[in-house]
Amino acid sequence: MARFLVRTADKDPGEVVDPEVYARDYNHKGDIIAVQPNGWVYGTAESLPNFVVINVSGIRHKRTRKYREAWRRRFDCSHARIAAESDTVRVNLDTTTPVGVDGRGGFKPAEFDGTLASWGMSPVYIPSKVSADVGVFTILQSQGFWGNLPVDEFTFSEVYADPTHTLSITYPKAVHPNLISNAATVKGGDVLSNKGGTLVVEFTADDVVNELSQLLRGTDDRVCKCRFHINSAVVDQAIAAGGTLSLSRAEFTAALMDRSA
């Protein structure tokens, strides 16, 4: 037999400093907090009103590792040039991890909306995919590409000769020349000159879209610690039973929800 410690209700989001941590950690009703062997006595704090214990017969503790494992939300980012004369690219994000059975855990396409908009894109949502067409020069003028630099105070012009964009950026005196040079270099640019408040730098479409891909992966390829949870009805049964409920292996399997499925 194995003894599963399960949360009885969603934790108050106000108790969690980081909202992203709240969304993916053990903060929701039915989340499996711990699994211990038969005979284990949970502490007084690991009981009602916050937790219940579900005893499952027919499952050996050493076989419960999979119920405590994490999983990772994943997506694939790809791009293709669709108009060489304007160097327009189509960016596709395939969200290969579906939304969990209770609506938590998986990707929702709209999660990408703010990021893509800040890069000058108007995304189109279709099942399990986000698609956006955008000119490379549009991205190069976007706030998303340049991060914290005051893009609204920059003046941009370019000379495009496939596949290279030679970008000329006039920037205000408040921006240190080394700051903008370093920002361009980090994002894959080849700085040609930087004097008199004007930076001249070369980029290719691959430089630009690879930078976007890395940003998205850094933001959204996340470990979701709580993969499995117990459905709410069974949790309610355990609460009604005084905090401890015994299930057969078949009953437990029927009650188990897998956010990666």
Image (tube, grey):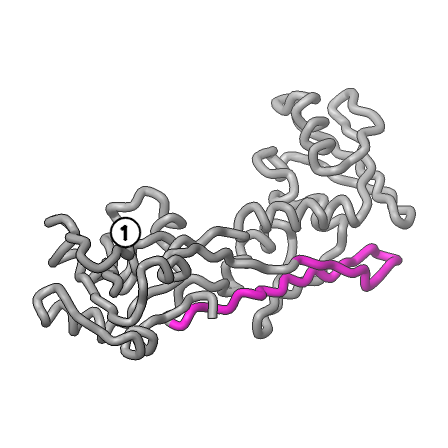
User: On screen, 234 above or below 25?
Assistant: below
Q: Look at the numbered disc 1 and give the secondary structure of its residue.
A: helix
Is residue 181 found left or right of 5 in the rendered image? right
User: 123 or 39, which lies in front?
Assistant: 39
Q: Residue at x 26, y 62 (%)?
A: 2
Q: Which residues are magenta?
A: 77-101
Is residue 10 found left or right of 237 in the rendered image? right
**Residue 255 rendering spot, x and y as whole percentages:** 30, 75
Task: Report crowding for label 1: few under 14, some 14 to 19, many 20 or more residues within 10 A (C-alpha).
Answer: few
Residue at the far right in the pictured view: 161
Q: Amino acid at mark 1?
A: Pro
User: On screen, 160 above or below 193?
Assistant: below
Q: Residue at x 49, y 65 (%)?
A: 108
Was residue 90 drawn as part of the magenta stretch in this picture?
yes
Tell me which corner region of the image, top left, top right, bottom left or bottom right, holds residue 246: bottom left
Is residue 26 found left or right of 127 in the rendered image? left
**Residue 166 rendering spot, x and y as whole percentages:** 84, 39
Is residue 211 found left or right of 237 in the rendered image? right
Do we see residue 115 in this rendering?
Answer: yes
What residue does disc 1 label? Answer: 13
User: 4 or 222, which lies in front?
Assistant: 4
Q: Residue at x 56, y 46 (%)?
A: 218
